[in-house]
Amino acid sequence: MYVGALELDILLGDVRSLKEKRAMVKPVLADLRRYGVSAAETGEHDRFRRSMLGVSMASSAVDHIHEVLDTCERHVAELPELQLLAVRRRIFGPED
């Protein structure tokens, strides 16, 4: 079994409150979950314009994990209302 994790550091557009931030992040997380992954806001909880999103999945094929995580990364990068600042990917396998 392999487990893949993706950390997405994003800058949100014109956000002036934590309530507006949640309203912007919630649909992004829902969209990511449609790809069969677990997704959550994992950092930058107290900053209006920044967010850290965590995405993870498990599979028996490492190629499948890379394919799905690539799709998730592209999806977030293409959203016009936010800017993807950094991405960190980790894959854990049987030897870890």
Image (cartoon, rainbow, N blue to C red):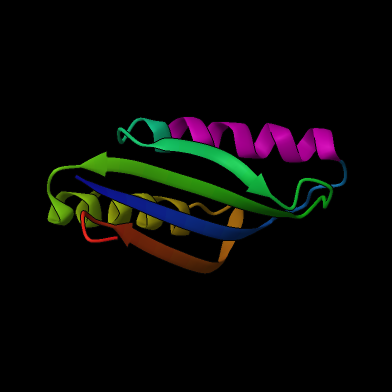
Residue 29 spot, x, y in % from top left: 51, 36
Name which residue lies at 72% across and 34% down: 22
Number of callouts = 0
Vertical side of 22 occupied by 45: above or below: below
**Foreground pick, 16 / 29:** 29
Name which residue lies at 30% across and 60% down: 96
Name which residue lies at 31% across and 57% down: 92
Q: Residue furthest right?
A: 17
Q: Which residues are magenta?
A: 18-31
Residue 59 spot, x, y in % from top left: 20, 41
In screen coordinates, is 4 left or right of 95? right
Name which residue lies at 63% across and 39% down: 25
Figure quadrant of residue 95: bottom left
Vertical side of 84 occupied by 79: above or below: above
Is 82 within the magenta?
no
Vertical side of 7 occupied by 60: above or below: above
**Foreground pick, 72 / 44:** 44
In screen coordinates, is 48 left or right of 78? right
